[in-house]
Amino acid sequence: MLAADTRQPLAGVQVNRAESAGQRGNTQLDKGGAGLMAGRVVRTDNGGYFMLEAERVLAPLWGAGWFSADLTFQCPGYERFRTNYSYLNLSTNTCQGQPALSAGDILLQPARK
């Protein structure tokens, strides 16, 4: 996670999985396990890196896997940024065999004054 204007790492950036209906201001409740899939918030370290734990979803059919993850990045003084990664972005596996990807350089734009 880098500042777009300086290319310096940003520590403490809040990284969230997809927002729930309540966070979006939607009056409808999430269906099924969408609220559970939202996961907990993580923050970037001093080098601007973050790691989200892999999640498994209980599915009626064997072989259900990770298909995509919508992520939101928020940091005081910077524009909020939302993007998604699909299984096509998977680049490797961790030592424990979990799927892993490199998100590359994510640039946060300074907030407009």
Image (cartoon, rainbow, N blue to C red):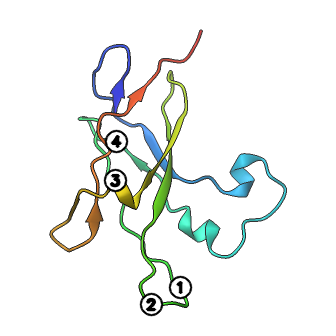
Residue 29 location in percent, x, y? 78, 65
Q: Going 55% across and 90% down the picture, which residue do you hit?
A: 60
Helix, strand or loop at disc 4? loop
Mark 3 touching mark 4, by CB under 8 A?
no
Q: CA distance from mark 1 to mark 2?
A: 7 Å
In this rendering, the answer to whether 109 lies above or below 61 is above
Q: CA distance from mark 3 to mark 4?
A: 20 Å
State the residue in front, 53 or 104: 104
Q: Going 24% across and 56% down the picture, which residue do you hit?
A: 91
Helix, strand or loop at disc 1? loop
Q: CA distance from mark 3 to mark 1?
A: 22 Å
Residue annotated with mark 4 = 44
Horizontal side of residue 34 vs 65, given as left or right: right
Residue annotated with mark 3 = 89
Tell me which label, 4 or 2, sits earlier in the chain.
Answer: 4
* Kind of residue at badge 3: Asn
Q: Nearer the viewer, mark 3 or mark 1?
A: 3
* Kind of residue at badge 4: Thr
* Kind of residue at badge 1: Ala
Tell me which label, 1 or 4, sits earlier in the chain.
Answer: 4
Q: CA distance from mark 4 to mark 2?
A: 34 Å
Q: Quadrant of residue 20?
A: bottom right
Residue annotated with mark 2 = 62
Helix, strand or loop at disc 3? helix
Q: Quadrant of residue 63?
A: bottom left
Residue 4 location in percent, x, y? 38, 20
Tell me which label, 2 or 3, sits earlier in the chain.
Answer: 2
Residue 113 location in percent, x, y? 59, 9
